[in-house]
Image (spheres, helix red, strand yellow):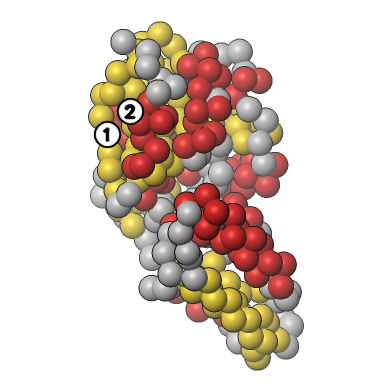
């Protein structure tokens, strides 16, 4: 262990969830959420992350046409067991049939356990889009179903489906996400049937369930690929949609009907079937 480490305290005035998504997709280490923002700790300096946050904030202000205040304060601190302190801050949670917990916490004997270590993964179930996707999987995925997790991230959604005895493929355009998904599957003594770096269009299979927890713009861009991957009577689960973009997304899925809308905070998850 090095003698010193760096702690970055980030405060944002609004749209905390979007900054959370940015950090999750950008940094290779875990981060802690606070009431007003985030705390990032690393044995390396965090100047690059500060620059990235500033650029993201500037782009977000332009896109939303509003002012967002961002404050980043980095400190060099004497090293103690900050990893242990961080681990204590990560709490398990129950979502319908599932119990998501880091490996250092005990399992829940009454629920389906999913082990996810935040230091190894982007999605831990705490974000509303991941939580609502897990609720949809809990309700709609059956034993023997074929499922593809498009944009798999940490692999948590595919792992949940495998825990329900579905046969699961997964893909992500980010190699780190693919590697994280494989690691987390192994943590749960599971293995994806197929997993690859790239889009779902690389698969010729048809699935009972197609899950995509991404962002609204990507869901519109890959609508044709998601539809092509789905069996005629299959279920399409779309998540990562801010409520103000729901109508825009549905415009690309006019040949589908809404089976259910799961709303958490300002996020919407759609469960769709062909008309």
Could you say which quadrant of the image residue 237 lies in?
Answer: top left
Residue 180 visible in the current orientation: yes
Residue at the spot 71% in from the left edge and 80% down from the top edge: 1
| Pointer 2 residue | 271
Please tell me which residue lies in front, 223 or 64.
Answer: 64
| Pointer 1 residue | 261
Residue 178: x percent and y percent? 64, 40
The answer to whether the residues at label 2 and label 1 have Cβ atoms under 8 Å apart is yes
Residue at the spot 58% in from the left edge and 72% down from the top edge: 40
Q: Secondary structure at mark 1?
A: strand
Determine whether, in the image, residue 45 is placed left or right of residue 264: right
| Mark 2 vs 1, N-terminal side | 1
Quadrant occupied by the C terminus: top left
Residue 241: x percent and y percent? 41, 40
Residue at the spot 55% in from the left edge and 27% down from the top edge: 221
Label placed on residue 222: none
Q: Secondary structure at mark 2?
A: strand
Q: Is residue 77 above or below residue 208?
A: below
């Amino acid at each position: 262990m090095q003698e010193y480490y760096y702690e970055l305290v980030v405060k944002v005035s609004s749209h905390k969830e979007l900054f959370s998504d940015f950090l999750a997709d950008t940094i290779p280490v875990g981060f802690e959420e606070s009431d007003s923002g985030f705390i990032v700790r690393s044995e390396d300096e965090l100047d690059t992350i500060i620059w990235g946050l500033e650029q993201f904030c500037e782009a977000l202000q332009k896109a939303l046409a509003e002012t967002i205040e961002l404050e980043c304060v980095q400190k060099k601190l004497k090293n103690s067991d900050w990893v242990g302190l961080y681990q204590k801050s990560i709490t398990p949670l129950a979502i319908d049939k599932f119990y998501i917990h880091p490996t250092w916490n005990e399992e829940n004997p009454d629920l389906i356990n999913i082990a996810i270590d935040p230091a190894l993964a982007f999605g831990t179930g705490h974000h509303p889009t991941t939580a609502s996707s897990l609720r949809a999987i809990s309700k709609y995925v059956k034993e023997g179903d074929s499922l593809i997790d498009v944009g798999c991230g940490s692999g948590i959604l595919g792992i949940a489906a495998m825990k329900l005895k579905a046969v699961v493929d997964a893909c992500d355009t980010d190699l780190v996400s693919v590697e994280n998904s494989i690691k987390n599957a192994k943590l749960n003594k599971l293995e994806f049937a197929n997993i690859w770096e790239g889009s779902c269009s690389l698969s010729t299979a048809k699935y009972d369930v197609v899950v995509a927890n991404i962002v609204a713009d990507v869901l519109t861009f890959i609508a044709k690929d998601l539809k092509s991957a789905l069996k005629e009577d299959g279920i399409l689960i779309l998540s990562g949609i801010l409520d103000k973009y729901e109508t825009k997304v549905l415009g690309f899925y006019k040949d589908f009907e809404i089976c259910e809308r799961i709303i958490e905070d300002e996020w919407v998850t759609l469960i769709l079937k062909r008309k």
